[in-house]
Image (cartoon, rainbow, N blue to C red):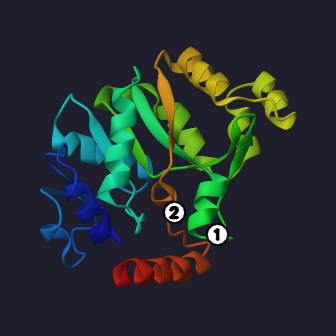
Amino acid sequence: MVERVVRALRGVAGIRRIAVVGPPSVEGLQALGDLVVPERGDILENVRAGLEALGTDGWVLVAASDLPLLAPDAIVDFLGSCERVEADFFYPIVRQEIIESRLPGIRKTFVRVADGTFAGGGLLLLKPFVLERVWGLIEAAVAARKNPAKLATLFGAKYVVQFALGRLRIADLEERVRELTGLRGKAVLSRFPELAIDVDLGRPDTLGRVEEALRRRDVQ
């Protein structure tokens, strides 16, 4: 899966260097990235390790390693959408109906808000300083990422009520992030389900569905 993700990143002209964070002992890992960075444990610490290794103050695209359907056009589309908006960090979201049109019946954590029902994608575009500013919020969000109601509690009682009533909007969450961190975060709507179709250890049936989709794509 890491190989597939790196291959997709290599197909994007604007990406100059790739740091792969993982166990250096894994066979073949050294050949994949421009830099191979020893993992530190949890998701956030691994992101921090990658950012430190790249040593840049510019924009960095963080990609999860379990996006086996990821393709360059999905990444290019996401980055193009980010260029059209002023923000400090960007995160893709994909509508449930788009994901299910690609893999009908797939089990994922979907969040229903007034704008629709969405799943988060496995990319994040940011500058390194952002991570430290939002560390506490992201840490709590990662811990609660499988529980939409718990996610809402991170933003305050008013947002819990709005979420329960189905009135919570994406714009409300973005504004609250700005109030809490002083940073502008932007949820970017993507038409590419590949950004949100990951392989979760707790949902082994998804792996079979993804392998079938890959076989169909290879045949085409």
Query: Is residue 128 shown to the viewer in this render?
Result: yes
**Percent position of residue 3, x then y:** 27, 70
Q: Is disc 1 surrounded by few (<14), some (14 to 19) or many (20+) residues within 10 Å?
A: some
Q: Quadrant of residue 116?
A: top right
Q: Quadrant of residue 27?
A: bottom left
Q: Quadrant of residue 206?
A: bottom right
**Percent position of residue 215, x then y:** 41, 84
Query: Does 165 sit above or below residue 67?
Result: above
What amino acid type is highlighted by mark number 2? Ile
Q: Which quadrant would the N terminus be assigned to in this image?
A: bottom left
Q: Are marks 1 and 2 in contact (CB under 8 Å)?
A: yes
Query: Does 141 sit above or below residue 37?
Result: above
Residue to which mark 2 is pinned: 197
Q: Is residue 156 left or right of residue 170?
A: right
Q: Is residue 14 left or right of residue 101?
A: left
Q: Earlier in the sequence, mark 1 or mark 2?
A: 1
> Between residues 128 and 83, which one lies in front from this camera angle?
83
Q: Secondary structure at mark 2?
A: loop
